[in-house]
Image (tube, rainbow, N blue to C red):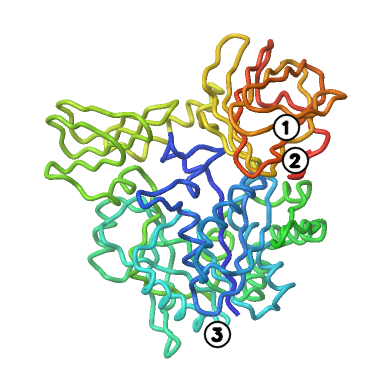
Amino acid sequence: MLIPLILSGGSGSRLWPVSREAHPKPFMNLPDGQSLLQKTFLRAASLPGVGEILTITNREYYFKTREDYGIAAGSSAADVNRHFLLEPFGRNTAPAVALGALKVQRDHGSDAIMLVLAADHLIGNPAAFAACVKEAEAVAANDLLVTFGIVPSTPETGYGYIECGEPLGDAGGRSVRRFVEKPSLAVAESYVASGDYLWNSGMFAFKAGVILEELRLHAPELMTQVEQCWAATTAVEAGLADVIEIDAKTFRSAPDISIDYAVMERSQRVAVIKSDIGWSDIGSWNAIGALTPPDASGNRVIGQAVLVDTENSFVQSETRLVATVGVKNLVIVDTPDAVLVADRDRAQDVKKVVQQLKLAEHEAYKLHRTVSRPWGTYTVLEEGTGFKIKRIVVKPRASLSLQMHHHRSEHWVVVSGTAKVVNGERELLVRKNESTYIPSGHRHRLENPGVMDLIMIEVQSGDYLGEDDIVRFEDKYGRT
C-alpha cells in the first residue's frame, strides 16, 4: 500500500508579494491556472494503487486546501480519499512526518509505504516521476529510507547535495555516502562534473514502521514529544474527509527540526533514487519566469505589459498594465496592494523585504487585499483613519460566524443576492439595494441562503479596525 503524504507549509517569502503568510506559495496559481498544491495532489492521486492521500497543513489553510483539492478533482484520477492532519502552528518537517507515520501505522499497519511530497514543488515529467516512485517502493520494501535525488542540470549553489554510493542490486537505488550542505560555486561545479552527486529534493519514501524506528533511534527526544502529542490528539470528522486536529499544547514541545537533520543524515539505512523528472522547487521569481517562453529580447511576461528597449526581464501583473522603458535584468511583480522591483540576480533576497515588513508590523507580509475565508472572500477597497470599506462575497449556503466587535460598527449594503442577517435580537432578510447597521457590541451574523454568490459592501467605522477585533460565539467552521 502506498500512501502519499503531502506536506503543505511555509510562507514562500522569496515569492512575495504573491505568496504571503495567509496565502502561501502552495496556493499560487501558475501560468496554466493550477496551483502548485493542486498539481501535487493530482500527481499523487494519479499514481497506481493510490486510494488515499494524507495532507499535513496548518489549521488556517485547511479550508483553502480542501477547496483547491475539490477544484482539482475533476478527473477520475483524483477520486481518492482525502485525510488531513492540521497543525496549530509550524514545527518543521520532522514532527509532521512522525505524526503522519503514526497515523498511517494506526490505519494501515507498519508495512504501508509513505511517499512524502512537498506541496510546492513542480515536476515537469509525470511519467518519469511515476517510474521513480515505483523504483522507490521496491527499495523501501527492503526496510530502507529512500530519498529522491535530482539529476543536476546546473551547478546550483542554493540546493543541498547527496553523494551517491554503490548500486543496491536488483531493486534499484544506490547507497548514500553523505549529505552535503549548499556548496560554493566552484564546489558545485566539481559535484556536477563528477556525476556522483544529486540535488536533495526533499521527497522520500519509506515504510511507516521503519521511519518510526529510525526516528526513535536517532531523535528519541522528538519521538517522545510526538508520541505524547499523538496520544493527546483527538479526531474530528468533517464531511467525507478525515480531519485530525493536532493537540496544540503537546505539539508546542516538539523540537523544530527537519526530517533531514533528525534522521536522514544520521541513519545507516538510507538509499537514493536517481530522478530525472523535470523537478523544480519554484524557489524564486526566476523559476516562475522560466515557466513562460521568452521573447526575442529574453523578456518573459505574465499578464499585460508594454516593453520598450527592455531586455532579460520578467514582468507579472494581475490586473494593471505595466510599462517598462530602457531597463534590463529586472523582476517586476505587480499586485493590487504591492509592487516588487528587483534585480534578477538578487531574486533570492526578496525574503529580506518580508523580514522588514514583519519588523514594521505591516500587514502586507501576511495578507493580500483580497483575503480568502471558509465562507468566501473579502477585499479591502479603501481605508483611512477611522474607516475601512470592504467588498464581501459569501458563497451559496455559507455563513460567517455569530460574532461581535468591541471597537467598530458596520454598515452593510447588499449589492447582489439576498442576505440573512442576525443583528442583535433581530433576524431579517436584506435584499439588493437594501442595508442594515450593526452597532459595536451587537452580536451579528451574515448568511447567504441563496444558490448564487451574495455580494455586499461593508463600511466599518471605529477607533480600531484590526481583523483581531472579533469575538466568535458560534461558527460552523470550528473557529470559535
Residue under the image location 47 percent in, 31 percent down: 354
Instruction: Name the one closer to the observer, 265 or 452.
Output: 452
Mark 1: secondary structure:
strand
User: Gap between marks 2 and 1, in whole Å?
Assistant: 15 Å
Residue type beneath disc 2: Arg
N-terminal label among 2 and 3: 3
| Image-based side of 313 in relation to 235, left or right | left
**Are the residues tagged 2 and 1 within 8 Å (C-beta)?**
no
| Image-based side of 404 in relation to 48, left or right | right
How dense is the environment of label 3, judged by Cα within 10 Å: few (below 14), some, or many (20 and up)? few
Instruction: Reply above or below: 313 against 166.
Output: above
- In this figure, which residue is indicated by the disc labeled 3? 142
| Image-based side of 405 in relation to 31, left or right | right
Instruction: Name the one closer to the observer, 12 or 388.
Output: 388
Residue under the image location 69 percent in, 26 percent down: 468
Mark 2 or 3: the one toward you: 2
Residue 261, position in %: x, y?
A: 54, 58
- In this figure, which residue is indicated by the disc labeled 2? 479
Mark 2: secondary structure:
loop
Instruction: Name the one closer to the observer, 219 or 158.
Output: 158
What is the quadrant of residue 6 in the picture?
bottom right
What is the quadrant of residue 242 in the picture?
bottom right
N-terminal label among 2 and 1: 1
| Image-based side of 275 in relation to 271, left or right | left
Residue type beneath disc 1: Leu
Instruction: Name the one closer to the observer, 175 or 418.
Output: 418
- In this figure, which residue is indicated by the disc labeled 1? 446
Residue 455, position in %: x, y?
A: 59, 31
Residue type beneath disc 3: Asn
Mark 1 or 3: the one toward you: 1
User: Gap between marks 1 and 3, in whole Å?
Assistant: 56 Å
- Specify the quadrant that holds the C terminus: top right
